[in-house]
Image: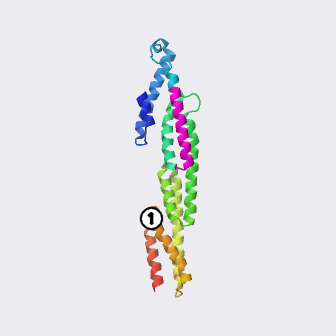
Amino acid sequence: MESCFENIKQFQNTNEKEISDETRILSNRLHEVSEVKTNCSRVFSFFSKKDILEHWQQKLSSHRTELAEKMEKLRHAGQVVALKNELLIVKILNRLDFFLKNEKYIDIYTKYQSVLFSKIDNVSKNVSESIEKHQYDRVAREMTNLKSSGDDGEHHLEQSKQALNRGLDIFIEDTKHQAIMLGNNIETKTIEPIVENLKRIQKARQFVSQFLDTPEELDKCVEYVKEMIEE
């Protein structure tokens, strides 16, 4: 049981089946010991550790507390992906809840699942704000966080992709229109806004191309505007 527990504590989210198997084995062993104590007291009297059940209750309770503290730190740090990984572990460990008297693993899962959803909502809002401000480096960072959130962030990721594509389509058309309206009026004050827009489009190409339906439209816009200015 000790080896199972150590493997659980050292789990690095590399193999979900591994921690699931270790948890199942530990759970089965604890069930067996509990049944022996309840139904076969004579056999239990031969156990070298008479307080084995109390020992494991304390051990699991301490581990549950450590996980809760770790997840609270992740919440404060806004580490959505790491928090999701810990939730995966806690969800598997709730198989041991039958053995805990007070707060259980499922209590942590319920609490921080809600926290995760709230964090994902905030990330989605950050994406929307960054699109409006043309902060495409931040858009890419936040959308990568949504992508890393798996199923929990999938809906928000798709919504953000749609908003990004729609926003850039409008921005591209506005930039082209500005270039057309420029005509022969090639003055610094009239061309500066267009140059600034081209810089933003270049930044979008650099950071968010992988999230666009037609990333080639960015290059086409840049070439079109350059041709209009050079005519």
Q: Secondary structure at mark 1?
A: helix
- Residue at (44%, 17%) from the top-left corner? 48
Find out whether residue 158 is within the magenta segment: no
Can you say whether 225 is above or below 110 in the image? below
Coloration of the structure image: rainbow
Instruction: Give the residue furthest to the bottom.
Output: 184
Residue pictured at 51% horizontal, 29% vertical: 59
- Residue 77 sits inside the magenta stretch: yes
Circle 1 packing at 10 Å, graded few (<14), some (14-19), many (20+), is some
Frontmost residue, 218 versus 79: 79
- Seen in the picture, residue 152 relative to 209 is either above or below; the reply is above
Q: Quadrant of the N terminus?
A: top left
Residue 66 location, x and y as percent?
53, 37
Is residue 214 visible to the viewer in this orientation of the structure? no
Residue 129's quadrant in the figure? bottom right
Q: Position of residue 131 (x, y in %)?
A: 55, 64
Identify the residue under disc 1. 209
Q: Position of residue 23 (x, y in %)?
A: 45, 32
Is 8 in front, or is 39?
Answer: 8
The residue sitting at 56% across, 58% down in the picture is 126
Amino acid tagged 1: Ser
Highlighted magenta segment, given as a residue range: 56-79
- Magenta stretch prevailing secondary structure: helix
Q: How many marks?
A: 1
Residue 157 visible in image? yes
